Amino acid sequence: MKKVGIIMGSDSDLPILRKTMDTLHALDIPYECHIYSAHRTPVEARDFALNARKNGFGVLIAAAGMAAHLAGAIAANTTLPVIGIPCKGPCFDGMDALLATVMMPTGIPVATVAVNGGANAALLAAQIIAVSDEALAQRLDAKRAADAAKVLEKDAALQKELNA
C-alpha cells in the first residue's frame, strides 16, 4: 500500500493533523508526518515533494494557516494528488487560508477540505488510495456504515425521548 505524506507548515497545526493521523491509523494506512514551511524551509518542502513518488507515497496532505502556500508549493513539485487543509489562523477565522489553498492556477491542482478538516483529508486520501486497493475500499465502506449506524442510534434515542 502507498503511504500518505503529511506536511504541516508549523507545529501549531499539529492538533488538526492529529485527527488526520488518527483517521489514517484507524484505517491501517501507513503515513509519515513532517514540518516543512513553504516560506521558511522551501528547499526541504520542495525536496520532499520531488522525491515523494519514489519514496512510496501515493497522496500528500499539506496543512497550513494564514498565507497557506504550503499545499500549492508541494503540488508545484509533484504530480501526486495533494490535499490541502486550510487551518484557522488568528486573523481572518481561516478564510485567508481557505482562499490561499483553493485559488490554484490551472495545471497545479490542490484538492481542498474544510478549514481544520483533518479527518476529511485523511478520508479523501484513503478514497484515492482505495481506487486500487480493494481491502481498503472495504474498510472505508465499513466505516461509512458504522458512521451511519451511529446517527440512526442517536435519532432513535431522540425519538424515544420526544415520544415518551
Image (cartoon, rainbow, N blue to C red):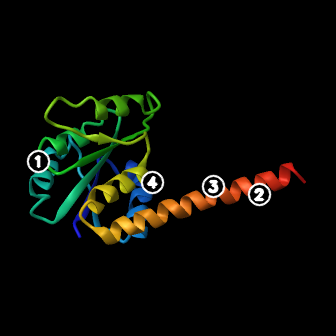
Element marked by disc 2: helix
The structure residue drawn at horizontal position 45% and vertical position 54%, both measured from the top left corner, is 15
Instruction: Decide which of tag 4 and tag 2 comes sooner along the chain.
Output: 4
Residue type at mark 1: give it.
Val
Task: Tell me if label 2 and label 1 are in contact, CB under 8 Å.
Answer: no
Which residue is denoted by mark 4 in the rendering?
A: 15
Q: Residue at x 43, y 46 (%)?
A: 117
* Pointer 2 local density, CA inside 10 Å: few below 14, some 14–19, many at least 20: few
Separation of marks 4 and 3 at Cα, in angstroms? 25 Å
Say which quarter of the image contains residue 95: top left
- Residue 63 in view, yes or no: yes
Indicate the amino acid at tag 3: Val
**Which image quadrant: the C terminus?**
bottom right
Q: Is residue 92 left or right of residue 102?
A: right
**Pointer 2 or 1: first along the chain:** 1
Image coords of residue 8 (percent x, y): 30, 50
Residue denoted by label 1: 43
| 63 shown above or below 96 | below
Residue 32 relative to residue 139: left or right: left
Residue named by callout 3: 151
